[in-house]
Amino acid sequence: MKENKIHVIGDSHIMLFTGQRCPYLLKIPIDIVYPHPYDLYKEFDTYFCVLLRAFHLMYPEQLPQASNFFNILNNRPVGDTILIVVGEIDCRAPLVNLVRKGLSPMKDAVEKCIERYMTGVNRVKELGYNPILFSPTPNQYVTEDRHEIIASAIGIPKDLTVKDWFDLKNEAVIYFNKILNQTNYPVVSLIDWIFKENIQYDSSYWGDLIHLGEKVWCQLPKEFEKIGINLTLEKYNVERRS
């Protein structure tokens, strides 16, 4: 894969690639031609698609979120690298809800979601870009005594314990990551590292209950190196656009 600017397109988890301390207040894009001035890493330009899910990215049947994604994509230079950041929202609510309602085993729910997602990813490739898939991450684990705070922030159903909900989310994330790694596309994943180092239980690695924070930056070059991309994470001295 040729080395070039990496365009990061996706949901709020693109924050990890802005170079800003997380959580950072992302701005809903109005001008789809240029990335935002808050991008500080020279190697990444980020583009925020509000609540974009992997399930939305079906092609050719484009939902509004997918249309927004492809509008942004079509304004990037053909041949460039596109890091697609989706899946966490799918794992956090829709997939878990399908399982809880008895409508689908987790395995089938994840596979169906990724089947739709791959139609969009394949279209990115057909248009002449080099897609990379960012695997969805688990959430910060906190104790049961904060159930009301967690439920409000993440949307945990009242009938589930915190542990029950996190176990379901982790099951979705782990299987989602496994299936992504069986595709023909390069995957950047923090999952093995998060579970090995117990990052879920260390609040210093998190910007909030859902989004990873700046302490994770040191791991990004190691994960990108696995797919043949060397990152410096060099920052601009000041915000580059006014």
Image: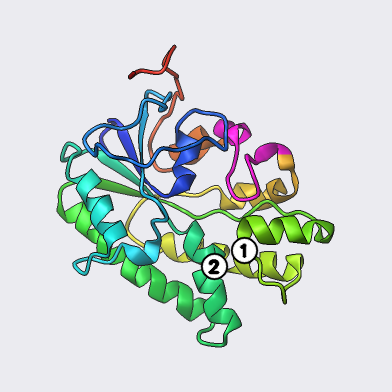
Sequence-wise, which precedes: disc 2 or disc 1?
2
Q: Position of residue 224 (x, y in %)?
A: 44, 39
Q: Secondary structure at mark 1?
A: loop
Q: Is residue 242 left or right of residue 72?
A: right
Is residue 234 magenta-colored?
Answer: no
- Please tell me how many numbered marks the rendered image carries: 2
Question: Does residue 4 lie above or below 84 as drawn?
Answer: above
Q: Nearer the viewer, residue 200 or 188?
A: 200
- Can residue 121 be seen here? The reply is no
Viewer-nearest of discs 2 and 1? 1
Residue at left 36%, top 62%?
A: 183
Residue at left 53%, top 67%?
A: 175
Residue at left 57%, top 30%?
A: 21
Tell me which corner region of the image, top left, top right, bottom left or bottom right, holds residue 219: top right
* Residue underneath mark 1: 155
Q: CA distance from mark 2 to mark 1?
A: 8 Å
On the rendered image, what quadrant is the N terminus found in?
A: top left
Tell whether label 1 touches label 2 (CB within 8 Å): yes
Q: Amino acid at mark 1?
A: Gly
Q: Is residue 83 left or right of residue 135?
A: left
Is residue 212 magenta-colored?
Answer: yes
Q: Which mark is residue 93?
A: 2
Q: Secondary structure at mark 2?
A: loop
Region of the chain picked out in magenta, as a range: 204-218
Q: Position of residue 139 (x, y in %)?
A: 63, 54
On the rendered image, what quadrant is the C terminus found in?
A: top left
Crowdedness near tag 1: few (<14), some (14–19) or many (≥20) residues, C-alpha within 10 Å: few
Crowdedness near tag 2: few (<14), some (14–19) or many (≥20) residues, C-alpha within 10 Å: some
Residue furthest right in the image: 145
Q: Position of residue 196 (x, y in %)?
A: 68, 50
Q: Which mark is residue 199?
A: none
